[in-house]
Image (tube, coloured by chain):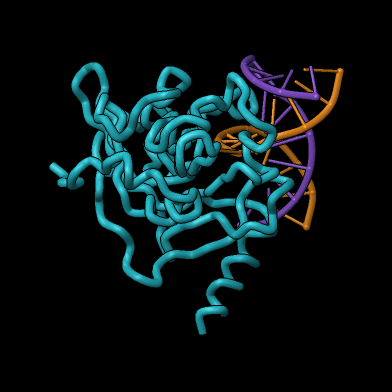
Chain colours: A cyan, B purple, C orange
Amino acid sequence: MTSAGRRLPRRWFARPSPVLARDLLGRVLVHRLAGGERLAVRIVETEAYAFDDPASHSFRGPTPRNAVMFGSAGFCYVYLSYGVHQCMNVVAGEDGVGAAVLLRSAEPLSGIAEMSANRGTDDVLALCSGPGKLCQALGIDGTDNGADLARGTGLEIHEGRAPARGRVLVSTRVGIRTGLDRPWRFRIADDRWVSRARGAGDLAAGTAVRSRRR
DNA sequence: CGGGAGATCCTCT
DNA sequence: GAGGATCTCCCGC
């Protein structure tokens, strides 16, 4: 059994979303199913969204959909994307701020048979390589909106192991048309489990970060 | 293998 | 009534 370490406490989540997004890399998302099965994945790609961020659902203030974003850190915000895909966020920051981190892709650790069934494919590289795929594999949907990740009610985030220093790539976010000035997409460098993000910004931003380190 | 379009429906204007 | 924090399939090269 994989030892994912302790469950992370609420104060750990209560930081600015770009800080939390980076620190979520390497952590383990666990979903315990009603049947007793335990699905676990290692987070390898995230994106931060903030209250004053035109790309964020919270940008125009609280609404019924984004209400969870304006609550306490460590809660789960799930929304339906394009009427088809569920996407999971981790609420960040102080209460009432409206910040969150989108989980974009992950490495399957346990419960792979169940995740394959949920996704309808045996291609393990395609199980969690995107925000919609990740939710489908783990069986996360609208009923998980508002779940308390810090309290351990079946959907939890455990300590895992952070990537080695210098192993984090930073780039612009994917699939948005505003807020492209913010380099708030984080992923583990040279990790085969990150999503294949299409779009011009990806390679350019990635190489920019790489060359900046020289 | 890269790009483009359609699916599909909820949310807010 | 328009427009998505996406995914997959189906082209064409």
Across and down, in percent, residue A155 comes to: 31, 29
Farthest residue toward the front? A95
Q: Position of A206 compared to A154: left or right? A: right
Q: Position of A10 compared to A85: left or right? A: left
Across and down, in percent, residue A17 comes to: 49, 48
Q: Is residue A148 visible?
A: yes
Q: Is residue A88 above or below residue A13?
A: above
Q: Is residue A178 above or below residue A121?
A: below
Across and down, in percent, residue A102 comes to: 50, 42
Quadrant position of residue A204: bottom right
Q: Is residue A113 visible?
A: no
Q: Position of A122 compared to A159: left or right? A: right
Q: Is residue A26 above or below residue A127?
A: below
Taking the spot 26% from the left edge, 26% from the top edge, the residue there is: A154
Farthest residue toward the left? A1
Across and down, in percent, residue B4 comes to: 79, 43
Taking the spot 33% from the left edge, 47% from the top edge, the residue there is: A12
State the residue in front, A176 or A126: A176
Q: Position of A198 compared to A110: left or right? A: right
Tell me the quarter of the image containing the N terminus of chain A: top left
Question: In this figure, what is the number of numbered marks?
Answer: 0
Quadrant position of residue A94: top left
State the residue in front, A43 or A14: A14
Farthest residue toward the bottom? A214
Quadrant position of residue A8: top left
Taking the spot 35% from the left edge, 70% from the top edge, the residue there is: A165
